[in-house]
Image: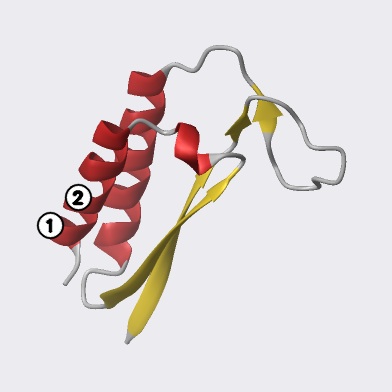
Amino acid sequence: MSFGIYIHWPFCLTKCPYCDFNSHVAKTIDQDRWSMALLAELDHFAEKTADRTVQSIFFGGGTPSLMPPATIARLIDRIGARWR
């Protein structure tokens, strides 16, 4: 059975007046800490869903384009290594 993975990046440069998503204005972000936390969460769920296939990956937020490209690459690499 296939499933999709949603990766939430809750940070924004400003809060849009119409936005009701779980998002927060952050002038600085501890990128390494967030990257490690997201990787740990992927590992946690990979143990519970190892027999399934990832059909899609969606980055949402907040403003996921604020995520460094290296972090995105690590997340996609980890997904590729943990699921088929």
Secondary element under disc 1, as helix, strand or loop, is helix
SS of the residue under disc 2: helix
Q: Position of residue 43 (x, y in %)?
A: 27, 49
Circle 2 residue? 78
Q: Which residue is mark 1?
A: 81
Which quadrant would residue 32 be assigned to in this image?
top left
Q: Residue furthest right?
A: 17
Q: Is residue 64 left or right of residue 73?
A: right
Whether 38 is drawn above or below 83: the answer is: above
| Residue pictured at 19% horizontal, 66% vertical | 83
Q: Residue at x 17, y 50 (%)?
A: 77
Q: Are marks 1 and 2 in contact (CB under 8 Å)?
A: yes
Residue at 41% across, 28% down: 34
Where does the N terminus fall, quadrant-wise?
bottom left
Where is 22 relative to 80, above or below?
above
Q: Farthest residue in the bottom direction?
A: 1
Residue placed most toward the observer, 15 or 40: 15
**In this image, 70 relative to 12: left or right?**
left
